[in-house]
Amino acid sequence: MQVGKLKNRVIIRKVLVLLMCGAIGWYLKGKLTPQVPNMAAMGGGEPSVLVQKITASNISPQATYIAHVEPIKSVDLKPQVAGYVEKVLFEEGSQVNEGDVLIVIEQEKYRATVALREAELDSAKANLVKMERDYKRQVSLSKQNIASKATFDNAESNYLQAKAAVKQAEANLALAKIDLDYTEIKAPFTGYIGKALVREGNYVSSNSTSLARIVQVNPIRVAFSMTDKDFLNIRQEYSGEKAANIRTQLVLPNGKIMQNHFMSRFTDNEVNSETATIAVYTEFNNDEGYLIPGNYVKMMIGTKDDVTALLVPQAAVAQDENGNYVVVVDENDIATERRVVLGDVIGENQVVMDGLAQDERVVIQGLQKVRDGQKVRASLISTEEEEL
């Protein structure tokens, strides 16, 4: 029995020693570890958040279509006569005006041909004068029964052939002048010309490829297709006097919006039976030159009667057991929870029907770091869309 008690005492003594060592270790750790200052007490604990100023936006319903920009007029300049290129008179990539001389093909031989045809015409006219006199003489003699019938017929035939020769010479001269005119390649309309595909000294003929290409850019055409259902709905909704209430917007590839540049439109004369769509062609004013042939843009069609509402990004909306709320940051950068009544979802935004006022700043990033009534470091982001 004494042996068992002795063992128990040893065990208890060891446990007490371990407890004392542990207590001494915690005491020394507290003394030797440097104290970390309270950052919140020093003003360095304010969370950083991104905020967005809430403004009223137009939420009028509108349809969106992918559209293709194309020139109303375009032409590949091709030679109508053969010869060496004497001059290239345009600057590549520049605007050319209707009637501008762009390329000159060697003109010397065509001028010579014109001179030759003029001489042939003069000869034919001189011969006609002679044949006409002979004919009139034979007419007079025939009335007096002096000239024979054969002589009269021969004179009449020569006279008619001389008249035909003059017309033929006039036609040949006209063709020669046309060929001479073709030695000057002119712009058929005002537009932008691209790269010159020939240089001085190149030989060209009527079988040659294009010399250059011109496209009209103002006004310009935007083409798109809509379903037959959409087409009928729009025709019914905007028929008659309501047609003036339609609004079109173009969203360019860089996000810019062209508004109120619409000039006219027309639709194709039949529905594509394979796709059940109809092509729509619209013309737009392009004074700024933002619409470039070949580009793809978004065509937005809606009503001119604006319906406005306050929109917030969906990321700004939080939810708890009491409902939906956002965090508003005031002019002193104090964050406050605000209960809101939500409407429809439009894209990545949420319509706020009640609970917010215009120009208030709402936290859109860093919401989880903010407590109600806490001071924050707010960075404002801009959401203004640029319109043209």
Image: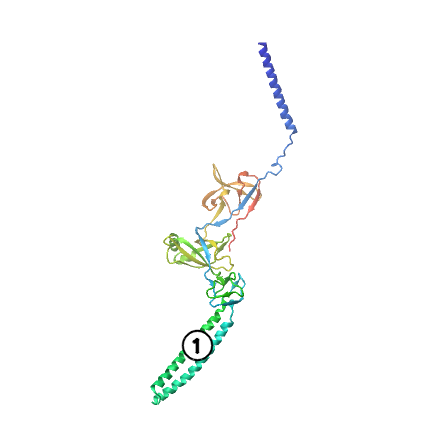
Above or below, 317 relative to 117: above
Above or below, 163 relative to 82: below
> What secondary structure is marked by label 1?
helix
Residue at 51%, 72% (x, y): give it: 108
Residue at 43%, 82% (x, y): give it: 127
* Residue 162 quadrant: bottom left
Total numbered labels placed on residues in the image: 1
For this orientation, the residue located farthest to the right is 32
What residue is shown with label 1? 169
Confirm whether residue 125 shows in the render.
yes
In front here: 74 or 319? 74
Q: Name the colour scheme.
A: rainbow
Above or below, 185 relative to 376: below
Where's residue 29, x and y in %?
64, 27
* Residue 50 quadrant: top right
For this orientation, the residue located farthest to the front is 150
